[in-house]
Amino acid sequence: MQNDTVTFVIDQKEVRARRGQTILEAAEQAGVYIPRLCHLKGLTPHGSCRVCTVRVNGRYQAACTYPVADDLVVENDTEELRTLRRDLLEMLLVEGNHFCMFCEKSGHCELQALAYRHSIAAPKYPHLWPRREVDASHPDVLLDRNRCVLCGRCVRVSRDVDGKNVFGFVGRGPHRHLGVNSRRGLGGSDLSADDQAVTVCPVGCLLRKRTAFQVPVGQRRFDRQPIGAEVGAGAGSPQPSESPMQ
Amino acid sequence: MMETVQEREQRQLNRKPRIATASLAGCFGCHMSVLDLDERILELAELVEFDRSPIDDLKDFTGPVDIGLIEGGCCNEENVRVLREFRKHCRILVSLGDCATMGGVPALRNTLSLQECFREAYCDGPTVYNPTGLIPNDPEIPLLLDRVYPCHEVVRVDYHLPGCPPSAESIWQTLTALLNNRPLDLPYELIKYD
Amino acid sequence: MDENGATKAAVQAICREHGNDRTRMLDILRDVQRRFGFVSDEAMDEVAEVTGCARIDVESVVSFYAFLSDRPQGRIVIRLCNDVVDELKGMPEVAAAFRRELGIAIGETTSDGFFTLAETPCIGMCDQAPAVLVNDVVVTDLDPDRVRRIVHRLRYNPDPSALVTEVGDGNNGHPLVRAMVRNNVRRAGEVIFSDRMAEAGLQQALRLTPERVIEQVKQSKLCGRGGAGFPTGRKWEFTRAAQGGPKYIICNADEGEPGTFKDRVLLTERPDLLFEGMTIAAYAIGASEGILYLRGEYAYLRRFLEHVLEERRRAGLLGQSILGVDGFDFDIRIQLGAGSYVCGEETALISSCEGQRGDPKNRPPFPAEKGFLGRPTCVNNVETLCKAARILEEGPDWFRQWGTESSAGTKLLSISGDCLRPGIYEVPFGVKLSDVLKLCGARDAGAVLVGGPSGRLVAPADFDERICFEELPTGGAIVVFDSSRDLLRIVSRYLAFFIDESCGHCTPCRVGNVLLKERIDRLRRGQGERSDLEYLERLARTIQATSRCGLGQTSPRLVECTLRDFRSLYEACLGRPDLELRPSFDIRAALRESEALVGRDSVYNWNEQSELPCRTTPSRL
C-alpha cells in the first residue's frame, strides 16, 4: 500500500503533507504562505491567475494545482518568483478598470492587498481601459465587470456549493468575460443575495447592494495586516526588491 | 561685485532645497493632504523653500527645483504643458496620488470616446440646456486629450506615491527620504490606493 | 406552428440526432449554425433544455469557437485567411476586391443577408495562398480578378461547391472531396510516401503483444511530430499502464500552427496509413474508441474520411475482432472542430471533444491518466501515427537509419513564403536549414520561421543549424521571408494571432500578449525607448514562465528570438534619445479628436523639437 504521507521541501523547509494535497494546501498547513488570487480553500483549483507560480524541481508550476510528491523541491519566496508575481498582478491591474479610490471593496480586496504586499506603487504596464458591462438588473446584487479578474470563484461556488450554475465564462482571449445564466442578465437568473457565490468574489465585481462602506477605514481587512499574514507565525510583509515607488 | 565660482557653489550648497507643486487633472485633494501635515508644515518650511506652487501662489518657476510634486494626470493640453515645464525644472519628479499615477477618477472617461463625453456633457445630459448643440470652443478652454494619461506616460517620472489622497504621513516620509537622499521605502501601512 | 415553435422543433431534431448528449455539444451547435446561420438565444435555450445543461454552458461554447456565432451570418460566409503568408502573397488586394464587390467590410453581412465577410487565421493552404473558405469550400490562389468572378458566380449560383471547376491532384479529385486544393508533394521521402503493403504494420502489430508493440515504438525513438516532440512509445506506455477504462486514442488533426499544412496532405493521401496507425495505437494502449479531431477548416475532407472509415469497417479493419483478433474491438469517429487554434493543445483538444469550450485543462493529471471524459487517453499527431504504422511494418532499426541521435526518422516539412517551390518535403531529421532552403528554391532569404510563430525566426547566420529536436525543432512549418520583409510587422501580426486564439483562461497569456503587441507596435511607430527592449524581454520571460499551456509558453518566442538575433531592427525603432519626454506620447495624435469635435486647432505650437510649446495666439486672460 502506498504510504499516505509525503515529505517535500519548500523554501529550504522540510514539510510533511498528505498525499493528494496540492503544494499550496500543504505549504499553508506548514505555515508557508504562497500568494494566490483565484484559489479559494475548498474549491476545485482553477489555475488561472498564476499568482501562485512556484518552481517545482526547477520547473514553473501553479502551486494551487500541482500535487505534492516525495522529493519535490519547491521554491516560493524567491526574488525571481516575487518578480513574476508582481508582473502578473500588474497585468491584472491594467487589464480591468480598477478605481480603488471609490470601490467599496477597497481595503477588503484581495487583488489590492496582493499589490500592497508586493509593494506595487504604479503598474509599469499601460492601462488597457477596456469597455465592460455593468449589470445592475438584480435587486440585491451588483455585477461590475470592470473589476472582474476572471478567477472563476463565483462560477465554481455557484455550481458546486450553491448548486445553481448562475455564472460561466463567455468569449475567449482578451474578450473572455463573466457570463450569466439568463438572457435578461443577473436579474433574470436565480441568484439570491444569500448565495455563497456573491461573497467569494476577491475583488469588487460581485457586490451585495446597500452594504457598502460599513467598516471604517483603518479597520478593514487589509488595512493593518498584509494578505497572507495569517498563514504561519512569522510570515509578515515580504522584503520589497525593486525600489517599490520607482 | 561679481560672485566668484566658489562663492556661488557655496551659496548653492547652503540654500534650502526647493519644492514645486502643481495640480493637473486632480481635485487638489493631494495638496490638501500636504496641508494635513499639520504642525509639521512648519518643520517642512524650515527644511525647504517652495518655488512654483499653489501653496505660495507662485505662478512661474524661479529657477531649478529639487523636487516637483505633481497631483493629477493629464486630461488636456494645458496639463501637458505644465507637466513638461515641471519635468524641465525639477531634478526629481514625483507623481503624487492616484490621478497622477494612474489617471484616477478623471480617467473614468477612458473607457468612452471623447465624442460620447462631449455629447453627455454638452448635449444629451439630463441637466443640459443647449439648443444650439454647440460644443464650447473658446481658445481659453484648453483642448481635451483623447484620454486621461498618467504623468509617467507623458514625461519621465522618478517616483510614484499612490493614494487618494496619499496620507500626510506618506508624503512626509517621501519628502524626508528624498531630501536626505535615503531610499524611498514606505512601510506596508502607507502604500494605499484609496 | 409559429416561428419560435419551428425553431424549437428543428433544434430538438438536431439534438436528437446526436443522442441529446451534451458531450456532443460541438456537433449539435455546428449543425444549428449550419441550419440557421447562427445560434440564436432561443436555440441556446433549447439546446440547454434538451441536453440537460445550463444555458450559460451553451453560450460559453458558442462564444468560444470562431465558426459559431450568436448573431445571424450570411448564407455564404467567406473567410479570408489572414495569415502572414497570405498577406505576402497578395491577400490585401484580394480582401479589398471582396469588400468592393460585396460592398461590406470585414465582419459585416450584406443587407440581403446573403454574404458575410470574415477573417480567419491560417487555413493550411500557405503553399497556394492567398486562399479563402467559402462556407466549407476552399478557394486557393486568389487574385482580384478571380474574386470578381467568384462573387458573380455565387450571386448566380449560391452553391459554393460550384466554384470548384478544376480539382487538385490525387485524392483532391476524389468524388467525395472535389477540392481545388493541390498536394504539392515536392519531395516524397521513404517513410510516408513510398509504396507499401497496405495494413502490413497492423498485421505485424497484431502478431505481437501490446507490450511488444510499445517496445518497438520505443526502440524506434519516434517522438511526437506535432511540435512538442514527446517520445511516442512512452506516451503509449503511460496510457496502457493507467488504471481504469475505457481508454481512448485521439488523433490530433487540428493542424493550426500557421504555416503548417502537412497533415492536410496526409489526411488527403494517406488516410488508411493514419487509421492503421490509430488502430495499432489502440491495440497497444488497450483503447476501444478512437477520435479523429479534424479541424473545422478541413471539413471538406470529412465525407471522404468517413468513407475511408466505412471501407475499413467493411474490411474488418475496424469494429469487432479486428483482423480476426478476438477481443480487439475498436472504432473511430470524427470530431469536427469549429475554428480554434488552441484546440491543437492536447488537453484543449480533449475539452473540445467533450463538447466544451476549448480551454486547456490543468496538468497534472495528464491525459494518459485522466483525459477524455476523465479516462486514460493518448493524443497523437497525424504524422506520428502514420510513422508508427510504418515502424511496425519495417521495424525500429529501419526507421532509425534516418535522423540524428535524439531525432530519429524523417520529418514532413510544409514550406511556404518566399520560395519557388512551396509544398511538402519529407526530409531526414538533421538536414541543414540551408539545404532545405536550396531544395525549396528560397530567394534571398532574410529570415526563416521554423516551427511557426511558436517556434523561432532564424537569422541567416544560423542557417547552417539542423532541423531536429536538438537544434531547430519544428512541427513542420517552415516559412521563408526574403530580405525585403518587415520582420517586426511579422512579429506583430503573429502576436495578434496569439491574442485572438488565446482561450483567455490565464492572466499572462490573456493580458501579456496584448501588452507585448502594444509595445512592439509602439516601437514600430518609432516611439520606442531603450528601456522598452528590456521591458519586452522581461514581459516575454514572465509570459513564458507563468502561462498554463503551450500557447502562452511559446507565444513570446518570436519577440525573444528577434530581440536576440535581429536586435538592430529594434535599435532602429528607438525614438529620440531624450528620456525626459516620453517618445510614446504623441500630443498631436492625442489632440486630433478634440480638434475635430471642437472645430479649432490647438492654441499651442506643439512640435517635436521644443519641449515647451508657445501659444500661437496670446491669451485674453
Image: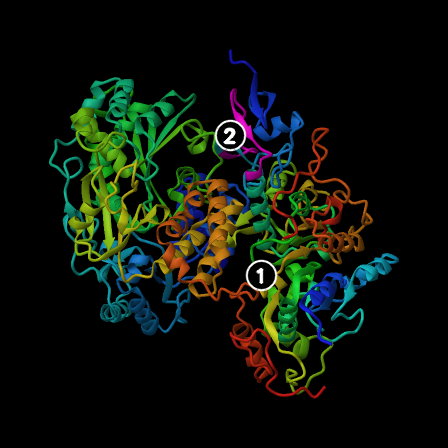
The colour scheme used to paint the residues is rainbow
Image x and y of residue C156, in percent: 26, 70
Report the amino acid beneath label 2: Val
Main SS of the magenta part reads loop
Closer to us: A98 or C105: A98
Q: State which region is magenta.
A: A60-80
Closest to the observer, C255 or A120? A120
Q: What element does badge 1 sit on?
A: loop
The structure residue drawn at horizontal position 55% and vertical position 76%, both measured from the top left corner, is C610
Real-space Cα separation, disc 2 to disc 1, in angstroms: 38 Å
Q: Chain of mark 2?
A: A
How many numbered marks does the figure carry?
Answer: 2
Q: Report the residue marked by disc 2.
A: A56
Residue occupying the point 52% across, 20% down:
A70
Residue that sits furthest to the top in the current view: A1
Residue C369: say if magenta: no
Which residue is nearer to you in this view: C466 or A64? C466
Viewer-proximal residue among C475 and C288:
C475
**Res A131 label:** 1
- Chain designation of label 1: A
- In the rendered image, the vertical position of residue C600 relative to residue C472, given as above or below: below
Q: Earlier in the sequence, mark 2 or mark 1?
A: 2
Eyeballing the image, is B5 above or below C293? below
In this rendering, position of residue C463 left or right of residue C11: left
Residue C576 x/y as whole percent: 48, 66
Residue B166 in sight from this viewpoint: yes
- Discs 2 and 1 share one subunit: yes
Tell me if mark 1 has few (under 14), some (14-19) or many (20+) residues whose alpha carbon lies within 10 angstroms of its own.
few
Q: Is residue A75 magenta?
A: yes
Q: Amino acid at mark 1?
A: Arg
Residue at the image position 37 percent from the left and 25 percent from the top: C239
Q: Is residue A53 left or right of residue C129?
A: right
